[in-house]
Image (cartoon, helix red, strand yellow):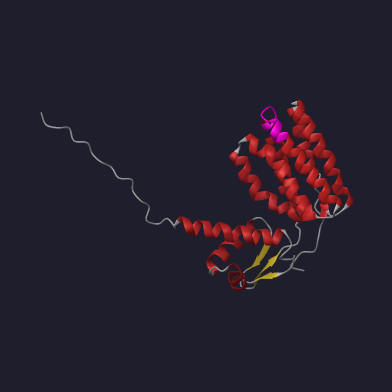
Amino acid sequence: MRPIQHAIYCMPVPIDSAPAERSLLRDDVFTRLRDAIVDGTFAPGEQLRDQELAEWLGVSRTPVREALLRIGEAGLVVARPGRSTLVSDVDVDAVRDARDVVAALHGLAVREAVGHLTKADLRRMREANRRFRSALRASDVEAAITADDDLHAVPVDVSGNRALRAVLEQYTPVLRRAERLRFSRPPGRESVARHDSLISLCEEGDAAAAAEVAFDTWHSLTPEPTADPED
């Protein structure tokens, strides 16, 4: 009897795919430029030049241009074809739109997480709120933002919703400058009480009420109008 021969198939290798290192490079350039805008390193109205940014980051101009296009989609820069790219002022409509999306998703994350939060998770949230309170008292806005992020990250992580996390990563940076204004002023201290309420409701297992507090915490973030960089 003749032996049975099995066909061997090889997975086709795409010939037009960029190496992983190139993709990671683009993402790193995007993250660094975006963070430099939202943390105030590059001020509203400041002109961004491809060559200078490339030299600062130690890369070619191509990933810088790609990053600026992505950042422009979020409304953080204004590109004027053939002229220049400027860091945008706070766009009230863009911040309001991002706020609505972020608030809704944090509410959803809390709703999904309640019932799965462990005692260790709740301790992480309380510890983050203690750091948040201390940072506000010390007028350390950057530390306050970090602590606030750490607190809200707990239910987001516990929810296990990767799509939700991806959308938050896209739109939360749009809110950063508005957050800095909030946490640099007395009304920012109201967030401490909201956090306490959120943690208590999560511990009690009241998913609906906890989700409402999470939503309100983000939805109360109000953008302030500034001048248009075109003016």
Q: Give the vertical position of 193 relative to 78 (above or below).
A: above
Q: Which residue does the image show at 64% across and 62% down from the upper left?
A: 33
Q: Which residue does the image show at 85% across and 48% down from the upper left?
A: 188
The magenta segment is: 113-122
Q: Which quadrant holds residue 226?
A: bottom right
Q: Is residue 72 left or right of residue 219?
A: left
Residue 20 in the image, given as x and y percentages of width and height: 46, 55
Q: Is residue 66 left or right of residue 177?
A: left
Q: Is residue 160 magenta?
A: no
Q: Is residue 63 left or right of residue 226?
A: left
Report the number of discs. 0
Q: Which residue does the image show at 17% across and 32% down from the upper left?
A: 4
Residue 95 in the image, given as x and y percentages of width and height: 74, 52
> In front here: 100 or 211?
211
> In front here: 38 or 86?
38
Q: Give the vertical position of 178 relative to 197 (above or below).
A: below
Judge whether residue 70 can be spotted in this image: no
Residue 172 in the image, given as x and y percentages of width and height: 69, 49
Q: Which quadrant holds residue 207?
A: top right
